[in-house]
Image: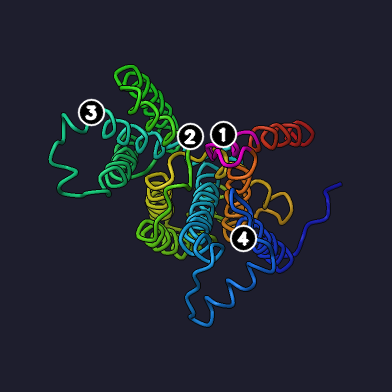
Amino acid sequence: MSAARLSPRATLGAGLALLALSLLLGAGSGAYAISPSQLWGVLGSLFQGHADASPEYLVFVNIRLPRLVLGVAAGAGLGMAGTLMQGLFRNPLADPALIGISSGAALAAGVTIVLGAWLLPSLPRTLGSWSLVTMAFGGGFLVTLLIYSLSHSEGSTRMALMLLAGIAINALAGAGLGLLSVMATDEQLRSLQFWLLGSLGGARWSAVLLVGVVVGVCLLVGLTLAAPLNAIALGEAQATLLGVDVERVKRRAILVTAFAVGAVTATTGIIGFVGLIAPHWVRLVAGPDHRIVLPGSALLGAVLVLGADTLARTVMAPTELPLGVLTAFVGVPLFLLMLRHFRRHV
């Protein structure tokens, strides 16, 4: 007997409530704690347009607020991308990392950190502080195009070939990062390792605006794919009979995933398990309808990233833990619970 499921309104309402709670906890927690009364005063000053010279105002506006917005955008992008991948592969254990976007971005960032001064000496003069972000995004996007071209045959995209190509690219990127780690100096190695483990610590308004716009557009486009993904869940042949242009849906879903995950990874580093966990748990409580799973996964992904970032800033304050470490600590137990659930129902 299946467990009772939440209605679409209740699911999205619960997601919004959890997101609001996560934002409040994240805004007040950290090496410099902000009490609820102080936070209320800061928000009042912001809404009224009055600048404040108090420490809590400066900390919130200059450090916490861009970090919170970046966390929402990153989690929403990863959660939505995970839903798209699971819908395309028709497998709730699929993940955006399957098509190598994160690995490609990581390898490009590693090359920039370790070999950038030798291979691309003019890059910092051209792009300035955007060098690493641009290279990482470009690396993820180029890998996505490569995997798509390898899996496209006779006018159709074969998801099995895409999976195999993604596994191969992930292995190659891992080997390349291992080689770069050996070649790196101590300072380069610290930068590389911290970037690979993910963090919202580098949040700045220019990056927040970039990721927010990219993820926002990707969410809008991704929501239009909900009904076609529902049809594809019945099988590609059945979806075609229902009038769905399956190849067009695949191209759009892959491009949306590439842009969203590429933009997030380029600014925050690799944040694992969010794209795997969020869609599955939304599906468990609300059912398989992608019209609910897509926005619900975006909300839950944002909650997971904000929660992990709050822990990263508070567990060993003032030392900040890498965000990817905490998402793995949370994600692995949830992944094991998923396996237990499948064992009971398969």
Q: Position of residue 161 (x, y in %)?
A: 41, 32
* Amino acid type indicated by mark 4: Leu
User: Is residue 317 on the magenta stretch?
Assistant: yes
Please report contact status of discs 2 and 3: CB closer than 8 Å, yes or no: no
Q: How far, Cα to Cα, is label 2 from label 4? A: 22 Å
* Range of residues picked out in magenta: 316-329
* Amino acid type indicated by mark 1: Val
Q: Nearer the N terminus, badge 3 or badge 4?
A: 4
Give the camera-side residue of 120 and 11: 120
Identify the secondary structure beneath mark 2.
helix
The circle on residue 325 is 1
Q: Which residue is mark 4?
A: 23
Query: Vertical placement of 86 versus 325: above or below?
Result: below
Q: Which residue is mark 3?
A: 115
Residue at 46%, 47% (x, y): give it.
Answer: 201
Residue 178, quarter of the rendered image: top left
Q: How far, Cα to Cα, is label 2 from label 1? A: 6 Å
Q: Nearer the N terminus, badge 2 or badge 3?
A: 3
Q: Nearer the N terminus, badge 3 or badge 1?
A: 3
Q: Which residue is mark 2?
A: 197
User: Is residue 292 on the magenta stretch?
Assistant: no
Residue at 41%, 58% (x, y): give it.
Answer: 208
Decide if residue 5 is on the left or right side of residue 250.
right
Decide if residue 84 is on the left or right side of residue 266.
right
* Amino acid type indicated by mark 3: Leu
Decide if residue 181 is on the left or right side of residue 225.
left
Please report contact status of discs 3 and 4: CB closer than 8 Å, yes or no: no
Identify the secondary structure beneath mark 3.
helix
Residue at 77%, 60% (x, y): give it.
Answer: 6
Is residue 202 in view? yes
